[in-house]
């Protein structure tokens, strides 16, 4: 496989937890891995791990709440490597906030990261994937958004349930262009 034929995956929130494990798994499967996160040191450590194992990886700072930054990073990666083979929209936050203390700002911030961040990354990657007639978008929801509620985390459960609706809508819209959209809903995972 030549360098230009090597598939590229962009993973958000890849500095720690599920995102870091996903980055390593894609590297093991032969992908060029673009590690994105707001956590630079942790992300660079993931890149170093992948490279020390013989894989190819790079880091880009990415705050999924910043539309301009999302579009800039996705564009820069695609300009260098061509259309992404896959994206994994994993970046997320979960803060314990009892309902009585749940301000509009805290609700909105969780949705900006956990739901709207997924949409931003998918929206940025979609045009090149559609033009190529291929690609895979994977959005990370949570069992707390599809099967259970989470005490003092209603904003998280609501955002992760929204990811399911987003995935369903995008899957129908992008299927005719050969782009697959799927969601996963992990159960209890010990992460940071």
Image (cartoon, rainbow, N blue to C red):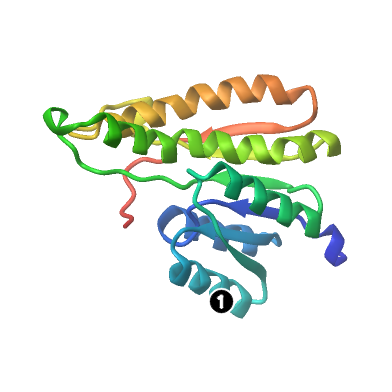
In depth, the one of 46 and 105 nearer the eye is 105
In depth, the one of 39 and 168 nearer the eye is 39
On screen, residue 95 above or below 116 = below
The percent coordinates of residue 127 (x first, y second) are 76, 35
Q: How many discs mark residues in the rendered view?
A: 1
Residue found at x 29% / y 27%: 148
The percent coordinates of residue 48 (x first, y second) are 56, 76
* Quadrant where the image shows the C terminus: bottom left
In depth, the one of 91 and 111 nearer the eye is 111
On screen, residue 189 above or below 166 = below
Q: Which residue is mark 1?
A: 48
The percent coordinates of residue 55 (x first, y second) are 67, 71
**In the shown orientation, is residue 111 left or right of residue 8?**
left
Extreme-bottom residue of the structure:
52
Residue found at x 71% / y 62%: 30
- Residue 41, image quadrant: bottom left
* Quadrant where the image shows the N terminus: bottom right
- Residue 95, image quadrant: top left
The percent coordinates of residue 158 (x first, y second) are 34, 26
Residue found at x 57% / y 22%: 168
**In the shown orientation, is residue 42 left or right of residue 3?**
left
Extreme-left residue of the structure:
100
């Amino acid at each position: 496989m030549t360098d230009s034929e090597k598939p590229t995956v962009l993973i958000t929130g890849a500095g720690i937890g599920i995102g870091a494990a996903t980055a390593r798994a894609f590297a093991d499967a032969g992908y060029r891995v673009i590690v994105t996160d707001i956590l630079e040191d942790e992300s660079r450590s993931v890149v170093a791990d992948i490279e020390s194992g013989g894989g190819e990886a790079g880091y880009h700072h990415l705050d999924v709440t910043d539309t301009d930054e999302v579009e800039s990073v996705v564009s820069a990666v695609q300009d260098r490597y061509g259309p992404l083979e896959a994206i994994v929209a994993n970046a997320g936050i979960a803060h314990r906030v009892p309902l009585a203390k749940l301000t509009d700002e805290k609700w909105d911030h969780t949705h900006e990261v956990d739901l709207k961040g997924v949409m931003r990354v998918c929206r940025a990657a979609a045009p090149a994937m559609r033009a190529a007639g291929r690609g895979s978008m994977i959005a990370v929801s949570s069992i707390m958004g599809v099967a259970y509620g989470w005490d003092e985390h209603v904003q998280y459960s609501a955002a992760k349930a929204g990811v399911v609706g987003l995935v369903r809508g995008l899957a129908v819209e992008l299927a005719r262009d050969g782009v697959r959209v799927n969601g996963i809903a992990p159960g209890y995972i010990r992460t940071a």
